[in-house]
Image (cartoon, rainbow, N blue to C red):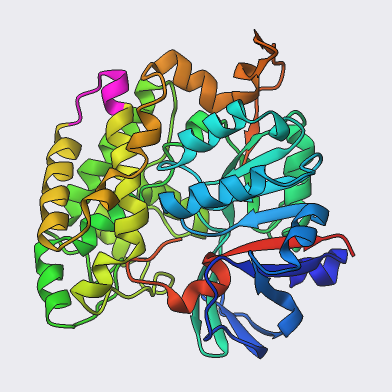
Amino acid sequence: MAAEEAHGFRPKLLFVRDTPDRPRGAVTRTNLVDGQQDRVELREDHFGSLYGQESQALLEQAEHIIVTVPDIPVLRLELMHRIAGLRSLAGKVVTFVRAGQGGQPIIADWVRRTPSLRSTSIVLVEDSFYGTRIDGQHIAYKRKLSVNVSVYSQSPQIAAERLRMLFPLGAQIGKASWPDVVVRPGIGLLFDPLGYIIHIGVAFYSKNLVKTRAGLKYLHYTDGIDRELAPLLAALDEERVELARAYGVETETFPRIIERQYGLPYRSDFYEMMQSCRDIYRSTSCASLGELRQSRLVREDLPGLRTIRWLADAAGVDLPVTEQYEADVTRTALELGVAPADLDGYLPQLSTMAADVTFLRSLLVDPHGLQEDGGRQRAASVLLRLPWSCMPGPVAHEELTQKRVEVLNAG
């Protein structure tokens, strides 16, 4: 709503799968980072369906399209197809939230293969702009200080500024926007997220599975991590950083990411760092194995793990902890009754791409430079810059912020 008030945009939330329990009317919001509260009014005209009668006209007219559906392959591919089918894409900024890792190579290849996207700016965000939980008419959120983004565009600097316009109040933290939008090359953004570690690793931990089987919920990021589990998560995190180096990229460990995003003091001990997040990470676990099987961590983060392993194989990098972890996770998922198709992630699409580090670096940095035009390779001068949430259980209460496509039209 801030964009509506500050810049005159008319926001419209188009649900891919509508939900009857979304908030309406007066809604209170609390920023868990600083405790500040405010109120907003959610009107019925703020909402719609992606496949409703008005959606085509809205998408055609939109200046910004923000896709906040989790990186679940079947949904992500469905939305990419919907966007590519628009008659006019020129000049639009299309932002994919939580676009790093699992599906990012697929998005880059989509840009490469789709001529109609050449005059469109595709923004990829490492995670969400806000970590949000909805409880009735109250929204608890964490306004991040900083988010990493990448941009696939012929005019990346302009696209980045247009994104920043949607997040006013940057003066309050001495930045151009709040959250501060930090531009990263696409190859760097690919290794920033780690849901495949911090989500699956916690939920599939044997002690936590005992709780889930018993219907006992726990705070995922804090109570779900003990002294025994923390070293494994830290080792997986270090191997993620190591894999990034094989692709010529420097990335941060998760404790450093938390420090950057929320301003919490850095602690080298992974367990202690996670326990220091108790006031900002309030997400709870799944309440049953049934919920766990259908959760985002299975349908979104398992694809991320598959992509990471594919990238390691392509680079010839040995990640012993991650390899054993993948085997353990796969076995646990099958024991829980997870459909084998959900374990594949984006492997069918990745299998059509060259498993070559040089090609993948070029693709992830500048897919426009690899586009074909009349059988000839286009020469590219643009490097790229900018953007592309996170909970274990099904997120019916998060539909407002995550299972939607948000369309912002100029007023």
* Residue extending furthest toward the right: 411
Magenta residue span: 312-319
Occupied quadrant, residue 61: bottom right
Does the image show residue 147?
no
> Which percent across, then down, holds residue 365?
56, 25
Residue 124 is one of the magenta-drawn residues:
no
The quadrant of the rendering that contains the N terminus is bottom right
Q: Residue at x 52, y 65 (%)?
A: 402
Occupied quadrant, residue 85: top right
Vertical placement of residue 115 versus 55, above or below: above
Question: Is 273 positioned to the left or the right of 57 in the image?
Answer: left
Q: Residue at x 83, y 64 (%)?
A: 9
> Which percent across, then down, holds residue 342?
28, 52
Does the image show residue 262?
yes
> Which percent across, then down, holds residue 274?
31, 61
Q: Residue at x 74, y 37 (%)?
A: 120
Residue 314 is one of the magenta-drawn residues:
yes
Q: 315 or 273: nearer the eye?
A: 315
Vertical placement of residue 177 versus 123, above or below: below
Vertical placement of residue 391 versus 198, above or below: below
Vertical placement of residue 55 versus 98, above or below: below
* Residue extending furthest toward the top: 376
> Which percent across, then down, holds residue 266?
39, 53
Question: Is 56 positioned to the left or the right of 19 in the image?
Answer: right
The quadrant of the rendering that contains the C terminus is bottom right
Question: Is 112 positioned to the left or the right of 44 in the image?
Answer: left
What number of labels is visible? 0
Q: Residue at x 37, y 40 (%)?
A: 346
